[in-house]
Amino acid sequence: MSIPFSCFTAYDVRGKIPDEFDEHIALRIALAFARFCDVHTMVVGRDMRLTSPIIAETIIAGLLVQGVDVIDIGLCGTEEVYHAVFSGAAAGVEGGIMITASHNPAEYNGMKIVQREARPVSSDSGLVEIARMAGDAGWVQSVMGHVAPRRGTCTQAADKKAYIDHLLATVDCRVMRPMKLVVNAGNGCAGPIVDQLAPHLPFEFIRLHHEPDGHFPNGVPNPLLPEKRETTARAVREHGADLGIAWDGDFDRCFLYDETGRFIEGYYIVGLLATAMLRQYPGATILHDPRLVWNTREMVVSAGGKPVLTRTGHAFIKENMRALDAVYGGEMSAHHYFRDFGYCDSGMLPWLLVCRLMSLSGAKLSTLCDERMAAYPVSGEINSKVRDPDAVIAEIERLYANGARDTTDGISIEYPDYRFNLRKSNTEPVLRLNVETRGDQVLLQRKTDELLQLIRS
């Protein structure tokens, strides 16, 4: 059996069950990872998808035969695997696998892989080689035919206390004031973590779709999609809540709504979190992705920090954060990375930090965001399926050749009063467009329409 290479993205593995990905393919990938990265002790976690338990069981059984010790943390979010790996480094933990397809539809599953200290394994750091090894039938047969002299041990470690303590220690919760929060776990894995944090916080929680359920009775959790936002927004308004919070299935992304139920684009949250981190670490380096930049740069510079542009994608941001010792990195897609969390992304730290910011300032989230949203209005990320993405990008680059050009990720074109970024998705067959202006909503609409017409024609 050959590996369907379509299940490998730039920085993880995702595929449709069973045509592109299943427990047998997952085991081959896990064995290749253990061999390529020389991993002898590994963390394995899984999300709530119906196929995740059998994939986890198959991987663990196969690793034990090969002499790899496994720490099984069971049902969890991706960041719990990250935490278990970077916090366990001193005790010999050398890598981790999270079984998840994040926000993909129910018929998908996949894997996120990290090595020592929760360093990501991406196409630039071993994922291609792992794919080749897993796809080599002869190599796989040789490995599976070998029984290690010592069978690995499996430790069940479902206790989340160390992870919860880390979150609470990273955000000083003593200053939190009582608030009412709507939390929408989307039947993903965030609900149990909210329940464990709740006794330590002065908040009233309104829980929506709280129980993990791989049947996705309320649809696949992906709050980035506009059609998925109204449930949380309506609950915020109905309950008079101070804040709304929603997560995707493995809760590595966190989405926020103000007290009016308005969805706040992740772009503006990046600026808020950057300034919050700069208060704690004056003059520090902040990383941001190239899709939308003006608001973040202005806020970081005003707060005395150093903004640095980096390629989109968790593997690339984490690598650059380590190289530059950045305290925070943010993507407009609601991925937020923290040096104090092993340079990894967390879906729990952002809302805790925003609640702390609201508590300290006494301001509503709308007050914290209104001025920034007016100063730099955005189109929101707009996806387009096209026959030849590279040809479309080349044509857009030709038509806007008189603008300042940057190719950090896709193509960014900048003019004095507007800029845009057009890039291929790393995980889906689409082009993604983002447009921003300097306070001009009319220009924003005109340029967005103009670009979409060119892209889709």
Image: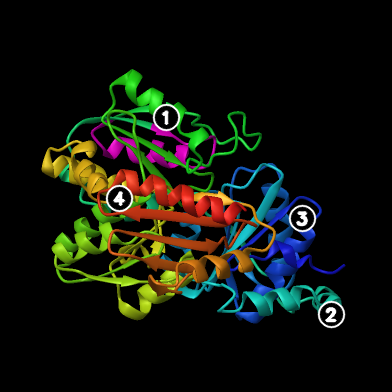
Which residue position holds label 2?
142
Q: Tell me which corner region of the image, top left, top right, bottom left or bottom right, holds residue 370.
A: top left
| Secondary-structure class at tag 3 | loop
Camera-near label (1 vs 2) is 1
Earlier-in-chain disc, 1 versus 4 = 1
Q: Give the amino acid at mark 4.
A: Tyr
Camera-near label (1 vs 4) is 4
Residue 268's tag is: 4
**Taking the image as drawn, is residue 156 in sight?**
no
Percent position of residue 161, x then y = 39, 50
CA gap between label 1 and label 2 equals 51 Å
Is residue 195 highlighted in magenta? yes
Q: Nearer the viewer, residue 445 or 326?
A: 445
CA gap between label 2 and label 4 equals 52 Å
CA gap between label 3 and label 4 equals 38 Å
Percent position of residue 386, x then y = 65, 56
| Secondary-structure class at tag 1 | helix
Q: Nearer the viewer, residue 387 or 255?
A: 387
Left or right, 352 with respect to 209, comes to left
CB under 8 Å between discs 2 and 4: no
Q: Residue at x 32, y 78 (%)?
A: 324
Tell me if residue 150 comes above or below residue 183 in the rendering.
Answer: below
| Secondary-structure class at tag 4 | helix
Magenta stretch?
Answer: 183-203
Which residue position holds label 3?
22
